[in-house]
Image (spheres, rainbow, N blue to C red):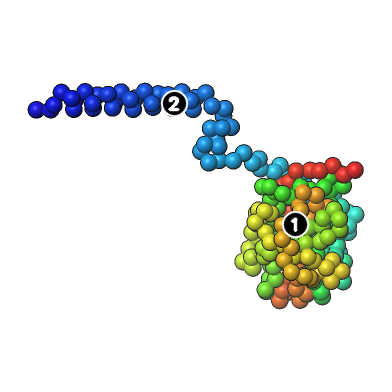
Amino acid sequence: MPRPKLIVSTVMCFMFLAIAGAAFAQQRAQAPAGQQEGQRGRGARVTRAPLLFREVWKQTPAGGEHPVDVSQSLSNSNLELKLYGPTGKEILMTGAATDENNPTHLWTGMCTTPCAFTLRDKGNFADLSGLARVKMLTKTSGFHKVNLIVKLADGTMLIGDSFEGSTADWLESDLAVGELRWRKLDPERVVTVGDWVNAPNLSKVDEIGFADLMPGSGHGQGGWSDVGFIEVYAKGVKRE
């Protein structure tokens, strides 16, 4: 049979735990929402970047394969197209918007050197910090891949370390910019120079595009890169 003192001690213990639990719950209810988030080990909520611009390319009325016209090949009038590399002007446009097996795209097959292109928003720099993303549709042949490149407001050009492109089909790639590592890019030769660039400031990016670091092999299945639509998800920073 239980002893009276033991029973009293047990009851008092349960009463103490109940009172303490109620007091803790009241303190949490009165604490600011931000403080409660901190208690859960969470930082401030980071907002995903909005769509800054999209480019799907504009085919000429005649269609077919033809040199890229920097003044006529863009469907988005707010953008400018820049070509880089010794044979950057040999980048061609081909495909058709109505053909899912061959959508309108830029093609590097006739570039006999590494080549690249970028898009520049006329009214905004792009803030590629935080949760910024770049999405694109690509297809490649041989050992070719495309890499994201950026031109900073001070003129520095960087190339990311993610190699994109499938030889099997047109595939969409969605790059989280914050996960990339960067090297400097020589825009005249479209080659990497120097060592890794640690923590570059991507809050004010002037141009965004892609580079193919291998010469094209011409028509056929030797080696080239195709780049279809491009979407940039980033905060806009107004140009002065």
Say what amino acid the circle numbered 1 marks: Pro
Is any part of residue 154 visible from this angle? yes
Q: Residue 140, relative to residue 204: is it above or below? A: below
x and y percent of residue 180 in the render? 67, 59
Residue 135: x, y in percent? 69, 53
- Disc 2 on helix, strand or loop? helix
Location of residue 168 with respect to 48 vertically, above or below: below
Q: Are marks 1 and 2 in contact (CB under 8 Å)?
A: no
Mark 2: amino acid: Ala
Near mark 1 (Cα within 10 A), the count class, few <14, some 14-19 or many ≥20, is few
Q: Quadrant of residue 82?
A: bottom right
Name the residue that disc number 1 marks.
200
Q: How far apart are labels 1 and 2 at the CA level?
A: 45 Å
Labels 1, 2: front one: 2
Direction from residue 202 to residue 90 in the image, left or right: right
| Residue sticking out furthest to the front | 5
Q: Earlier in the sequence, mark 1 or mark 2?
A: 2
Q: Name the residue located 62 percent from the left edge and 39 percent from the top edge.
A: 44
> Circle 2 is placed at which residue position?
25
Q: Which residue lies at the image location 86% right of the left edge and 62% below the top edge?
A: 83
Left or right: where does residue 13 sit relative to residue 204?
Answer: left
Say whether residue 172 is visible.
Answer: no
Name the secondary structure under disc 1. Answer: loop
- x then y, percent, for residue 183: 74, 65
- In depth, the one of 153 and 50 nearer the eye is 153
- Residue 126 in the image, given as x and y percentages of width and height: 78, 48
